Image (spheres, grey):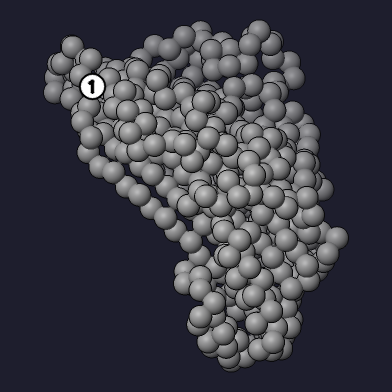
Amino acid sequence: MEENDMEMINGMLSGKEIDLASKCIETARRLGADRVRVTLSKSLMELFGTLNGELDKVNHCLDRSMSVSLFVDGRFGTFSTNRLEEEGLGSFLEKSISTVRMLAPDPCRALPSPDRKAAGAVSGTELDLMDPDYAAVSSDQRLKMAMDASIFNGNKDGRLISEEGEYSDSIYDSLVIDSEGLFCRHCETSFEYGVEMTIIDGGGNRYSGYWWDSAPRLRNLGIASCGATALERALNQIGPQKIGSGKYTMVVDNENSSRLVAPLLSALSGYSIQQKNSFLTDTLGNRVFPEWLDILDRPHQKGRSGSRLFDSEGVATKEHSIIEKGVVKEYFINTYMSNKMGMAPTVEDATRPVIPASISPGLANPGSLDQEGILRLAGDGILVTGFNGGNSNSATGNFSFGVDGFRFKDGKILHPVREMLITGNLLTLWNNLLAAGDDPRSCKSRQIPTLAFKDVDFSA
């Protein structure tokens, strides 16, 4: 896509807006700022929602903002505005700098060193996340896709009582520049459809099922099958049975497995470590997980959701191991935390975490590592297909989550179960990992497959 074509799309930053960001740095320096970072972002979203096969809502949202990080006389402050006009810029920055000078000194605040900054993200399209045909998608086409995706009027058995669907697409463009020469840009489009089906059984009980898909390019959006999948997930919940409390092998499907990874990544954050609010404090370089667990960060996968060449500081991302053979290889340490903690800086967060397929030693390979294969490997237990609230303690790793799913035996699903509670400790849970599948959902930025754990405490 040529630059002039890109600027024709309302969701893309214009040359005038980019020039204003540079002008912001020049003006802030002239007014007394020692160093400056400017983050400019712009997004456009179109949404068409349906209810029971009829158009229910239409949203058009255009948003843009400029965030300015100011380093002034050893002090630091961040300010934002959505008024991207040169008129009034000087007054905005003058007031902002005056405010920063009233703050307490913070010697740990600094821009990243030049050798850490991204250098290969100039056009914003290097990762192939922009659909070149985005500007050609019309409102009529969006409406037709939303209406065609509905299956409500095709349902004849009377059990489907509600269908809520949403088609949306968006374009996002962000630029990070600083007073030391940083210039990095990220552009992406996203197309998404999600639908919730609510059914009623013969006893008047209601069940809901949800399914969704998304992709950076429209041609890769699996919109046609979402309704049928959501309906099937609702129908499969009919006839839940109570089971006794106890320890069960737990399999978590690939739609929900990232829920168990998120607390691990949060515990590796420099902020959590520095605040002594992490159950992974002092574990860097140590094996605290099973040897068959790897968690990688793969942010440079072209055309894949979640890929990024830089973080919010403009620091270059890289493909690397977060956990390797059970060993914690990295904390997420931004420039500020690095200076505050005296630790080497990395990146501020996991960009696109991936868990590769693996099996605990001694277990027979089931032949495939999709959900069916993992169920065969696990034998007997509970398949979790939904989380219903709960929490985890970031300092201790203790957790308590409400779950729904299915009882299975000999690798075969027997019946649904509802409103159960799993409790335990995240370190113990992950050290009881039996297997990780090879089936992460491509639409997700966190590429986490079906997971299986032994000896998980379930209570009814």
Comparing 383 with 156, the one in front is 156
Question: Looking at the image, can residue 12 be seen?
Answer: yes
How many other residues sit within 10 Å of disc 1, few (<14), some (14-19) or many (≥20)? some
- Residue 270: quarter of image: bottom right
Number of numbered callouts drawn = 1
Image position, residue 63 (x, y; %):
44, 58
- In the displayed structure, does residue 190 sit left or right of residue 3? left
Question: Considering only vertical position in the picture, is 92 above or below 339?
Answer: below
Left/right placement of residue 328 relative to residue 97 reads right
**Residue that appears at 47% across and 36% down:** 136
Percent from the top left, x then y, of residue 41? 55, 59
Name of the residue lying farthest toward the front: 4
Which corner quadrant of the image does residue 395 belong to?
A: bottom right
Q: Give residue 110's quadrant in the image.
A: bottom right
Which residue is labeled 1 in the image? Answer: 152
Under circle 1, the secondary element is helix
Query: Which residue does the image show at 82% across and 48% down from the upper left?
Result: 285
The residue at the point 60 percent across, 50 percent down is: 4
Q: Residue 442: x and y, percent?
A: 57, 28
Position of residue 335 relative to residue 206, above or below, is: below
Q: Is residue 132 above or below residue 201?
A: below
State the residue at coordinates (47%, 44%). 170
229 relative position to 248: left or right: left
Q: Amino acid type of disc 1?
A: Phe
Residue 388 visible in this rendered orientation of the protein: no
Q: Quadrant of the N terminus?
A: top right
Quarter holding the C terminus?
A: top left
Foreground of the two, 162 or 165: 165
